[in-house]
């Protein structure tokens, strides 16, 4: 019985040591993650409607037409 109790105690100590190491690894990963992104998270991307894309495309075509008109003149 003494051996079994000693084994259980040893396993509990090992579990505590491993848990502490995991917490340290998690803290290191969190620190590295915040360094990598500059501490900011990316903003969620918003999708544009088809109408909005058409308006943007028309505006860009108008800008290019203006540039090309200046080159031709």
Image: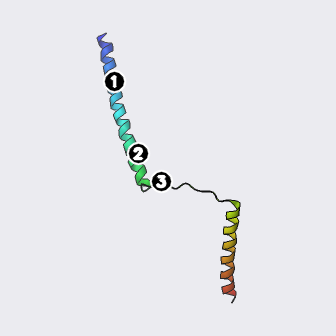
For discs 3 and 2, the disc positioned in front in the rendered view: 3
Residue beneath the point at 65% across and 59% down:
48
Question: What residue is pinned by disc 2?
Answer: 29
Q: Secondary structure at mark 1?
A: helix
Near-viewer residue (4 or 70)? 70
Mark closest to the chain's N terminus, 1 or 2: 1
Residue 19 or residue 4, whichever sits in front? 19
Measure the alpha-carbon separation of dots 1 and 2: 26 Å
**Left of 65 or right of it: where is 9?**
left
Coordinates of residue 24 in the picture (x, y in percent): 35, 40
Q: CA distance from mark 3 to mark 2?
A: 15 Å
Disc 3 crowd, CA 10 A, few/some/many (<14, 14-19, 20+): few
Q: Quadrant of residue 2?
A: top left
Q: Which residue is mark 3?
A: 41
Q: Residue furthest bottom?
A: 73
- In primary-sequence order, the first of circles 3 and 2 is 2
Q: Quadrant of the C terminus?
A: bottom right
Q: Is residue 58 above or below residue 17?
A: below
| Label 2 secondary element | helix
Q: Is residue 68 above or below residue 59?
A: below
Circles 1 and 2, Cβ within 8 Å, touching? The answer is: no
Q: At which x and y percent is residue 34?
A: 41, 52
What is the spatial separation of the Cα atoms under label 1 and label 3, in whole angstroms?
A: 39 Å
Q: Nearer the viewer, mark 1 or mark 3?
A: 3
Residue carrying label 1: 12
């Amino acid at each position: 019985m003494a051996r079994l109790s000693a084994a259980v105690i040893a396993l509990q100590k090992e579990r505590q040591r491993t848990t502490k190491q995991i917490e340290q690894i998690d803290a290191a990963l969190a620190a590295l993650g915040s360094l990598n992104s500059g501490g900011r998270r990316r903003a969620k991307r918003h999708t544009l409607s088809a109408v909005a894309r058409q308006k943007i495309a028309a505006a860009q075509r108008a800008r290019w037409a203006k540039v090309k008109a200046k080159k031709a003149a």
